[in-house]
């Protein structure tokens, strides 16, 4: 059973591969009735095509660093063939920061998260010090923006194995994540780890009762973490759950196929407090869904894909500054190679781009909205060399600022990310002025001022006033 669990992440890929021919044929046979956005300016660009030497098959998405550049991982390729960590500028100049070599990790499925200390943290599906799994049980690592990597933890099955998901840094400064295998029942775990590498297993899943996770977690405004299991649960089609920071897990919803099945990706909490996500299959047409679920577990299916508008959404959504959600599908669309779409909170979907392999194909990961207003993402395949791409998509949304973290007490340090912050004249927290320092054109440092209340953070520059993409919560 261990070998099966070690390669759990490939179950979905094999099923996707087996379905690709049928989906491609269906995309040809079914008339393409696809709504494309034309009401506002839209520009799609392939920024980089991987060529194995600099990485291959980027399965994860990107994260924008405090320096304005993007950081990501590739599943394979690089100097040793075991995957890479890379940096890419908004204009497309790519630098390989690290090539894995099995001893420090292999097969990078998850993306990165930038910690409050400025370093990036991530996981590897295999590799590491333990020999309890064929190829290694996977690792958790830290990497500096310049590329110095430190292995913080090597899994050994007892505490989990084969992590597929990115980490999330909690408000307490610790990182939380999931493993797809291992733990007490060999069906995966939820763990927390300190920035220095002390790991604690919070929960061990049991496929038959509470599921089996592939996706990462999101910390909600109430302090609890929410996530999905890809399969398992009462009906075998996956679940939505919440878990407290101390490890008490509650299954909120169990899918039954008609409302979606196999939620491969995690959740995003919207500004209205509800969570939004996707299922890989199921729904009215069998090709996956977009859903909304309340914190208490009431689920609404917002959209069922039908191949023409996409199929097999395996990526999480991102809520943009216009209030709408943006996402990708692995298959379907005009050419069968996947799509980028927009969906309103009420469920009206618009296909923004259909990949055609030459500009990328089969996007696995969520996009990120950068502080310049554009979206950036990766495709698992396609591009000039067939090894995947990095792309950008502009839909006419303007620049904004992003705070790290998004909540804090009076006096807490806050980083403000932006595109052109040089010459900023004021920073306010919901109208209360704060002292600040412009560190670079992409970064301002400040502290939560006395008297501040929950609301947007505004930065006034010579050109305009930039608002934060989410509300900053002032805590006690």
Image: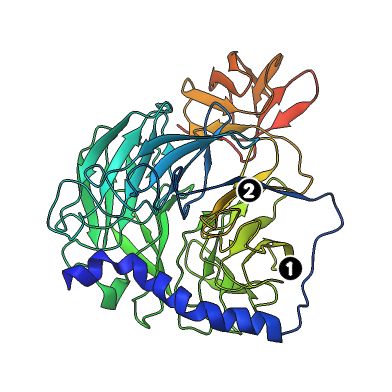
Residue at image location 47% in from the left, 20% down from the top: 411
Q: Is residue 305 left or right of residue 118?
A: right
Which quadrant of the view contains residue 161? bottom left
Is residue 306 positioned above or below 293 on the image?
Answer: below
Percent position (x, y) of residue 27?
67, 80
Q: Is residue 212 left or right of residue 88?
A: left
- The local secondary structure at tag 1 comes to loop
* Real-space CA distance between mark 2 and mark 1, rounded to the nearest whole angstrom: 24 Å
- The way the protein has been coloured in the rendering is rainbow
Which quadrant of the view contains residue 193? top left
Q: Nearer the viewer, residue 318 or 13?
A: 13
- The local secondary structure at tag 2 comes to strand
Q: How many marks?
A: 2
Q: Is residue 226 left or right of residue 304?
A: left
Crowd around label 1: few <14 · some 14–19 · many ≥20 (10 Å): few
Is residue 414 positioned above or below 270 on the image?
Answer: above
CB within 8 Å, label 2 to label 1:
no
Residue 474 visible in rendering: no
Percent position (x, y) of residue 197?
23, 37
Crowd around label 2: few <14 · some 14–19 · many ≥20 (10 Å): many
Circle 1 sits on which residue?
348
Quadrant occupied by the C terminus: top left
Circle 2 sits on which residue?
391
Which circle marks residue 152 in the picture?
A: none
Percent position (x, y) of residue 462?
79, 18
Residue at image location 46% in from the left, 38% down from the top: 86
Is residue 351 positioned above or below 409 on the image?
Answer: below
Residue 322 visible in rendering: yes
Which quadrant of the view contains residue 287? bottom right
- Of tags 2 and 1, the one toward the viewer is 2
Quadrant occupied by the N terminus: bottom left
Percent position (x, y) of residue 365?
52, 56
């Amino acid at each position: 059973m261990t070998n099966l669990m070690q390669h759990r992440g490939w179950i979905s890929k094999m099923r996707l591969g087996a379905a690709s021919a049928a989906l491609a044929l269906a995309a040809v046979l079914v008339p393409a009735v696809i709504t494309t956005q034309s009401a506002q300016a839209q520009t799609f660009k392939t920024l980089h095509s991987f060529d194995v030497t600099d990485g291959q098959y980027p399965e994860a998405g990107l994260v924008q660093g405090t320096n304005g550049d993007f950081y990501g991982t590739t599943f394979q390729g690089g100097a040793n063939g075991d995957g890479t960590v890379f940096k890419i500028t908004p204009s497309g100049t790519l630098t390989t920061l690290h090539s894995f070599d099995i001893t420090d990790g292999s097969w990078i499925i998850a993306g990165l998260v930038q910690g409050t200390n400025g370093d990036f943290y991530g996981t590897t599906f295999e590799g590491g010090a333990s020999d309890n799994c064929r190829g290694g049980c996977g690792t958790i690592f830290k990497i500096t923006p310049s590329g110095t990597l430190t292995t913080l933890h090597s899994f050994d099955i007892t505490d989990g194995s084969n992590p597929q998901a990115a980490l999330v840094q909690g408000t307490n400064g610790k990182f939380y994540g999931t493993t797809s295998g291992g733990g007490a029942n060999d069906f995966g775990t939820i763990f927390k780890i300190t920035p220095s590498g002390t790991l604690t297993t919070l929960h061990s899943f049991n496929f038959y009762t509470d599921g089996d996770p592939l996706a990462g977690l999101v910390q909600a405004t109430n302090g609890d973490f929410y996530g999905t299991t890809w399969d398992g649960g009462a009906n075998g089609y996956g679940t939505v759950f919440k878990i407290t920071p101390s490890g008490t897990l509650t299954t909120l919803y169990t899918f039954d196929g008609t409302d979606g099945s196999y939620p491969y990706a995690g959740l995003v909490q919207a500004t209205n407090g509800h969570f939004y996500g996707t299922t890989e299959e199921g729904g009215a047409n069998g090709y996956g869904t977009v859903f909304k679920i309340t914190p208490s577990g009431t689920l609404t299916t917002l959209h069922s894909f039908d191949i023409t508008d996409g199929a097999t959404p395996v990526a999480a959504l991102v809520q943009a500054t216009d209030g709408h959600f943006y996402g990708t599908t692995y298959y379907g669309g005009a050419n069968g190679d996947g799509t980028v779409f927009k969906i309103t909170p009420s469920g009206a979907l618009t296909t923004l781009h259909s990949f055609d392999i030459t500009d990328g194909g089969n996007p696995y990961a969520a996009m990120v909205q950068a502080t310049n207003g554009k979206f950036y993402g990766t495709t698992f395949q396609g591009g000039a060399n067939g090894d995947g791409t990095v792309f950008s998509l502009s839909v006419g949304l303007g620049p904004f600022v992003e705070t790290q973290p998004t909540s804090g007490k009076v006096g807490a340090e806050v980083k403000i990310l932006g595109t052109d912050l040089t010459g900023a004249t004021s920073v306010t927290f919901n109208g209360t002025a704060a002292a600040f320092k412009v560190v670079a054109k992409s970064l301002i440092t400040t502290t939560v001022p006395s008297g501040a209340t929950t609301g947007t953070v505004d930065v006034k520059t010579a050109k305009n006033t930039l608002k934060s993409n989410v509300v900053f919560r002032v805590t006690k």
